[in-house]
Image (cartoon, rainbow, N blue to C red):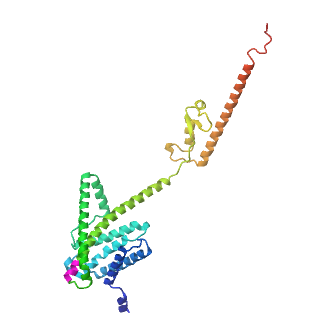
Amino acid sequence: MAAEDELQLPRLPELFETGKQLLDEVEVATEPAGSRIVQEKVFKGLDLLEKAAEMLSQLDLFSRNEDLEEIASTDLKYLLVPAFQGALTMKQVNPSKRLDHLQRAREHFINYLTQCHCYHVAEFELPKTMNNSAENHTANSSMAYPSLVAMASQRQAKIQRYKQKKELEHRLSAMKSAVESGQADDERVREYYLLHLQRWIDISLEEIESIDQEIKILRERDSSREASTSNSSRQERPPVKPFILTRNTAQAKVFGAGYPSLATMTVSDWYEQHRKYGALPDQGIAKAAPEEFRKAAQQQEEQEEKEEEDDEQTLHRAREWDDWKDTHPRGYGNRQNMG
């Protein structure tokens, strides 16, 4: 039974070839990246490549103690497994987990580049970690001249990688039919897979640059959202009714607004009212509830209306007295001293 189970399990070449085929189908798919058909291929390809990576670890096929020449020509292609994993991870569509997908894909690409760097497949510089790249960016931004030099060197490196990539693709397309049909000798097969490794080195370096930029944008977006949420959660003070500050009560009566819609109060009244409700600058956020402010404002309005009514009654009595004096001259009714 154990022998039959082993025969039914997929072998490493089948896992690798099927995963590679699914990646190629996803790359040339005409359907949207978030469609069910494409995502099913992505998940299936990741599962097969994960099993292939576990099998490679169990077989201990690669060792950092050996040179590239010691690896069999037919086994060189298995070095591409982490690169394929990173490429398929980038094809996953889930906005809520986008940051996790980017970080996982970056780990796969770094793993692939580290292996190629140890075996000296090509001459290139390993990308820095996220923390080191952030510190390097801060240091360069403080000086304009080194920053310009770095930008120019990066641009030149991108141009060089693009030219190299096009040349590699041209050579691979010329050798593909002979290798896949089994007509190529061992030397041609080895050259074919080494060209594939070099091509995916360029792809991995470009993908890591893109990933670092997107991770930076996502983290800045998340930090801005947290800041806006904390600001909106702060306690809002109840709206304060407009008023005019005066030095004393008499001045408030003389220099009022002239209409009842705008309240007036003295500086002492304003200070006492805000001290009572804990709304002064040295007392923190106001402790009074909006209902208490409403009652206080209502009492203030009633007091003002009462004062206005008293003023109207006094004015009315003064006008009546002036009218009476106009119709009754001085000495009116005094008949005792008439000559």
Give the image quarter of residue 264.
top right
User: Residue 189: where, in percent of width, then height?
Assistant: 22, 81
Q: How far across and down, in percent of the image, does residue 248 sit? A: 57, 31
Which residue is painted at 38% across and 71% down in the image? 91
The image quadrant where one finds the C terminus is top right
Magenta segment: does it hold 188?
A: yes
Let me know if residue 7 appears in the view. yes
Magenta span of residues = 186-192
Relative to 108, is 216 above or below? above
- Residue at 52% of width from left, 42% of height from top? 280
Q: Position of residue 108 (x, y in %)?
A: 32, 71
Q: Is residue 283 left or right of residue 63?
A: right
236 is higher (above) or lower (below) than 8:
above
Q: Identify the residue shown where x is 24% and y is 73%.
A: 170
Q: Is residue 334 left or right of residue 285?
A: right
Say if 332 sits above or below 123 in the image. above
For the question of whether residue 125 can be seen, the reply is no
Q: Nearer the viewer, residue 51 or 95?
A: 95
Q: Which residue, as the protein is rendered here, is positioned at the far right?
A: 336
Q: Position of residue 191 (x, y in %)?
A: 21, 78
Q: Nearer the viewer, residue 205 or 220?
A: 205
Which quadrant holds the N terminus? Answer: bottom left
Looking at the image, is 65 positioned above or below residue 227? below
- Residue closest to the far top: 339
Farthest residue toward the bottom? 1
Between 314 and 278, the one lying in front of the other is: 314
Residue 85's image quarter? bottom left
Q: Is residue 279 magenta?
A: no
Most common secondary structure along the magenta stretch: helix
